[in-house]
Image (cartoon, coloured by chain):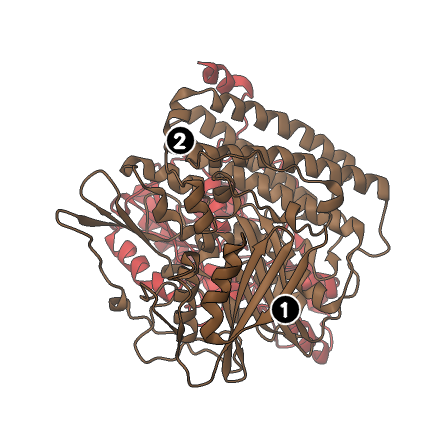
Amino acid sequence: VITVLTDTEVRLTDLPATVAAILARGSRFAGLFASPRGSDVRLRSVLVRGKLVELVDAIVPDGCSRYPALTPAVPPAAWYEREINDLFGLLPAGHPRTDPLVLPLVAGSPPPRPGSPVRAARAELDLSALPAHLTGEGVFTIPYGPVRSGVFEAIEYLVETPGENIPHLRSRIYYKHRGVERRFENLVPADGVLVAERVEGVASVAHALAFCQAVETIAGTDVSRQASLVRVLHAELERVANHLDSTIRHTEAAGQAVALARLTVHKERVQRLRSRLCGHRFGRGVVVPGGTSGPPLVSAREALRQVGTLEPAIRSDIHLLYETPSFIDRLRGTGVISPEVARVHAAIGPVGKGSGQLDDARIDRPYSAYERLGVESPRPRDEGDALARQRVRSEEMWSAFHLVRESLDELNDLGLPHRWSVPCEAESGEAVSWCEAPQGEVLYLVEMAEGRLRRVKPRSASFHNLALFPLAFPKDIFTDFAFIEASFGISVAGASG
Amino acid sequence: MPWITRGLKDGIVTTRYPKRPDGYDRTWRGSVSVNQSRVDEPPASGDLESVASSCPTEAIRSENGLPRLDRGRCILCGRCVELYSDLFTLGPDFENSVLRRESLVVPQAAESEHALTDLRGELHRRVRALRRSIHVRHVDAGSDGSDEWEIAALTNPIYDIQRLGIFFTATPRHADVLLVTGVGTLGMADPLRRTYEAMPYPKVVIAAGAEAASGGIFARCYGVNDGVGELVPVDVWVPGSPASPFGLLHGLLLAIGLLPRRSASRPPEDEARQ
C-alpha cells in the first residue's frame, strides 16, 4: 500500500464547500488545524479515505478575525473550530456554539497563537465565560467533576437531566489544558519527542512514533527494519495495556470483583514486561528520531516466554467475562452510536470500529513495520454499543499479541542492525504523520525551520472521539454512564492539550 | 461460579514491600543519581555549563563547581546519563520521597539535620491519630494521564495498599491524605484548593511526580502553575515521571510515618550516599 498525500489550497470562502464535497465522496474528516504564516493564519483540514490523505488549505489574512465556519456543513469540525477560536482568536462565523472549549480566556487577553514567534504569556482564565445551558422545563444540570469519585483524570461533565435519562451532556475539558503545543516550539526533535511522550501519557509510544515519523519524513530518513520492529513491539504492548485498562473499568462498574482483581494483575504484568523491555513502564525513551534508543533489554526469547504466559491468562479471563451474564448485560445495548452517527461524526479507533467505521492506520496507511507484518482487519460490527467497542478492544489485543510475537521472532532472526538510530538531520519543511494509538488515529502536523521545531500540532484520538460522547446517550440512564465512559477509553490529557 | 475458583487459582501475588524488598526486576528507571566519586573531583566549570544545558528540563545546575540534580524537575529521560556517564547513574532506587522540596536536589548539601527532625516530628504528631486507617483522596491537577494509572495500580492485588490500612476515598470529607498529580494547570487551581479545604484536620498533602513538583517538561507553559507547591501546602514530594507504584507507596508510608525501620534507619533525604 502506498499512501497518497495531496495538498490543495482554496479560497477561504470556498473551504467549507470544498471539504464537504470531498467528504461526500466518502472521505473521513480527520481534523482542522491552524498555523501562523507570518501574520496570516493557514487553516488546514485533513481528510482521509483509505490510503488517500487529502490536505485542503486556506489562508485567513492578517487583520481578519473571522472565517466562514465549516461546522454547519461538516459536523465533526465543531470542536476543532472551537479550539482554533480559543488558541488563535479566530471566530468561525456561523458556528452554532462558540463558547470556550480548551481555554476560557479573560476577554481581550491575547490568545496563545501556537507557532507564532511571540512567546505566550501566562494565560488568565475567566470561568464566567462558560455558559450554563438548560434545554427544557423540569430539566436540571448535574455537574460531575472535575474532581471525581475515584482515581480519574480531571474532566467535568455537565449532565442535563429530567431525572433518569440524559438528554443532554457537555464535557468541559479546559481544566487540564497545559498548552502542550507551544512547548514543542524551538526545540530540536530529540527534545521534542520528550514532549510528545507526555501529551497523552498512556499512549506515549504512539505519540512519540507519530511525532518521529513526521520528523523523519522532513529529514528523508529511513529507519532500520530492526528499529521499526522494536517500535511495533512497544506500540502493541501499549495497546494491550490500554485495552486492558478499559476492560478493567467495565468490570469495576459492573461490580465483577474477581475479574477486576485478575485483570488489574494482568495489566500490572504487561506494564512490568514493558519496563523490562526498555526500563520504563510506559515505554518512554524507546522511540527517538531516526529509530529507537536501542535493542530490547531482555532477549527476544525471554520476552516471547513472558508473552507466552501473559496472553493465555488474559484470553482465558476475558473469555470467561464474555460468558458472565451480569457483565454482558450491562454492556449490551448501552451507549449506542449508530453506524450513521459514527460516519457523519467521523468516529475513529475502537469507538468507530464498534460502529462499522473500520479505518485503521496500521492497515490503510501502513507505517513502521506494519505492512510486512500484516495486521488482521477487525471484524465488521455495527451494533455500536459498549459491548461492540469492548469486543473490538479484545480482538485488537489478540492481534497485538500476534504482532508482538511476530516482531520478536523477526528481531531474533535478523540480528543486530548497523545502528539502532540513524542520523536524522531534519532541517526545514513540514509533514503530516499518523499512527494508530490504542484510542484511535493520532495525527501530528510538524513544521521545522533551521533544524528546530516551529509548530507542532498533535491531535489525539481522545480529542476527536470525546466530541461524540454526548451522542452516546440516546436511551441510557445515569447508571450506564460509567460503562459508556469506559467504552470510549478517553485520555483527558490527550483531549485537553 | 467459575470466578470463585479462578479467584483462588494464582495463590498470593501480593508484594511483601515494605517489609521485604520486592523481586520486581531492578532494571527500570527509578532515579538518577550524581556519582559521588566525581563530586569530590569536579569537572572543569566550563564542562559543567554544558552538562547543565544538556538537561531538557533544566534539572541540572552547577553549585560551587559541583553538579546538582533536582529530582523534582528530572523526568528520567536519561540524557545526562547517556552523555556524562561518569557523572550520572540511572538506578532502580525508588525510595526517594522527601519532606522538603529542596531535599529533591541531590547530592544533598549538608543541611540542618535539626530542621529536618523538626519537620518529621511535626508531621508525625499530625498523623499519629491516623496510623492504622488512612483515607486518600486523589486529585489530578493536570497530569499526562499516566500518573493515574500508577495510582490506580496501588489497589491491584500485587500492591494491595489496603493491607497497609490505606484506602482511596471518593469524598474529601473522609480524606486524610490529598494525593496530587500533574503540573498544576490554571483550570485546576481552584478545584484543588476547594478539595484541600473540604478535608478535615489533620491532613497531609503528597505531590506525586516531577510534574507536580515543578511542572516537569511543561514548566512555564502558558496554562501551567509550575507544580502544585504554590497551590496547596505539600508535606511529601515523590519524584518520578510518572511516580511508580512503589515510589508512591514509599511516599504514602513516609507521609503517615509507617516506613519500617529498615528504611527509617536510612532516611531518604540522605542522598549523598551512593
The residue singled out by tag 1 in the image is B55
Quarter of the image where one finds residue A299: top right
| Labels in figure, total | 2
* Mark linked to residue B255: none
Q: Residues within 10 Å of mark 1 (few under 14, many from 20)?
A: many
Mark 2 surroundings: few (<14), some (14-19) or many (≥20) residues within 10 A = many
A256 left or right, relative to A126: right
Q: Which percent across, then down, holds residue A270? A: 60, 37
Q: Residue at 27% of width from left, 38% of height from top? A: A478
The chain drawn in red is: B
Q: Nearer the viewer, mark 2 or mark 1?
A: 2
Local SS, label 1: loop
Q: Residue B251 versus residue A278: which sits nearer the camera?
A: A278
Question: What residue is rendered at 26% in x and 45% in y?
Answer: A167
Image coordinates of residue A286 in percent, x first then y, are 68, 53
Compared with A59, A438 (above or below) is above
Viewport quadrant of the C terminus of chain B: bottom right
Q: Is residue B87 visible?
A: no
Q: Position of residue A402 (x, y in %)?
A: 68, 34
Viewer-side residue, B80 vs A161:
A161
What amino acid is labelled 1 in the image?
A: Cys
Chain name for mark 1: B
Element under label 2? helix
Query: What shade has chain A been given?
Result: brown
| Mark 2 lies on residue | A331
Q: Residue at x 34, y 72 (%)?
A: A105
Tell me: residue A37, above or below residue A328.
below
**Which amino acid lies under the numbered mark 2 shown in the image of this protein?**
Leu
